[in-house]
Image (tube, coloured by chain):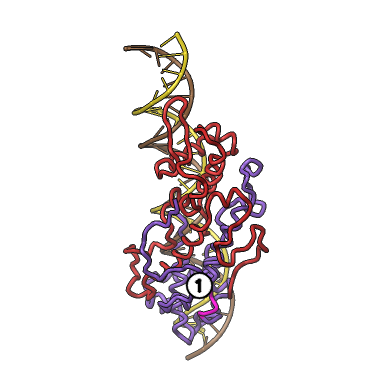
Chain colours: A purple, B red, C brown, D yellow
Amino acid sequence: MLKLSKLTDYAVVALVRLGQKEEVTTSPVLSRSTGIPEPTVAKVLKILATQGIVTSQRGARGGYRLAHPLEEISIATVIQAIDGPISLTTCVDGGDCDARSTCGLGGQWDMVNAAIRNALSAITLADMKNHTVTDRLGGLRTPSMPGGPAATA
Amino acid sequence: MLKLSKLTDYAVVALVRLGQKEEVTTSPVLSRSTGIPEPTVAKVLKILATQGIVTSQRGARGGYRLAHPLEEISIATVIQAIDGPISLTTCVDGGDCDARSTCGLGGQWDMVNAAIRNALSAITLADMKNHTVTDRLGGLRTPSMPGGPAATA
DNA sequence: GCATAATTGGACCGAAACAGTACTGTTTCC
DNA sequence: GGAAACAGTACTGTTTCGGTCCAATTATGC
């Protein structure tokens, strides 16, 4: 349902929390601080470490630390790190679309993907922490939007 | 992986094809026309009928017809019809986020959802049919984009 | 008016992906 | 040398998705 995985949600929470501390932080501490179960937060941090979003320090007195300031990490980066590349359909870039010849709309999904990526790249973790939204997004509303369905029809 | 279901992809293809015909069209005809398996296209049309996107005519000589012109149906509408509401996280509008008190970012995901919805609502099925893109989206690239990751970090 | 055929409507089931957990190994500090 | 913490792998339960089948409905032809 166009819903990103819960792991990504956890990742954002953990990263924002991590950005509020200067020293290295361990998984258990982060777990208590965020309310996310220990094994899960450990798994998330592990993935983020492999993607270079956080740096890890092994051994006693080890832990995790942000590799970049919050302002330089976009939502799109986190999503791609956890969930993989952002592409709405499998019918892109040589996918196995068996109806390619008849479907008619060749790579029209690419522009949709680009729109999504664009919107997600414009929001950083710092924007998530602060409750103010930068106006880089055209027509973006304030956090508490009317809530009605955005159906155009 | 922020990927919408194949059903939605099928729905768009079927709707665009349906928009090219005036008279009512049956599932088998649409299946042959699009290359989508018969049962699947039937299921998609069924869902779209319940959502009011297409009108159905039961019985012999029945079939489906578009309820609105292609220009008035946005991608967001189709996605919401098939996949359900567009909300990236479960932690919105009274969701069961058990870490609400500690996570810190109350409804910050809402602005992300709004951005997505915005981008998706700006693209109509007519845009998918024609290979030209209207410039309603700020910074949207042409269909064949470079393809590099949109990571900001 | 009745039988028949065509088509949608709703329910069901198997398969795949995901979230979460546990365990073992490696590294570093005390 | 012992303890603490990350790294990697494997496993299991759950949910969701994709696909299929059968029942309800309506127009047509006799």
Which residue corresponds to the image point at 47% horizontal and 52% vertical from the top-left? B79
Q: Nearer the viewer, residue A143 or A29?
A: A143
| The magenta stretch spans residue A73 | yes
What is the crowding at mark 1: few (fewer than 14 residues within 10 Å), some, or many (at least 20)?
Answer: many
At which x and y percent is residue A137? 51, 70
Q: Is residue A70 above or below residue B93?
A: below
Which residue corresponds to the image point at 67% horizontal and 52% vertical from the top-left? A94
Instruction: Name the residue beneath numbered marker 1.
Output: A123
| The magenta stretch spans residue B46 | no
Which residue corresponds to the image point at 48% horizontal and 69% vertical from the top-left? A44
Our reading of the magenta stretch's main secondary structure is helix
Chain letter behind tag 1: A
Find the magenta span and give its range: A70-74
Horizontal arrangement in the rendering, residue A41 relative to residue B126 (left or right): left
- The answer to whether residue B91 shows anywhere in this view is yes
Q: Image quadrant for the N terminus of chain A?
A: bottom left
Which residue corresponds to the image point at 45% horizontal and 54% vertical from the top-left? A152
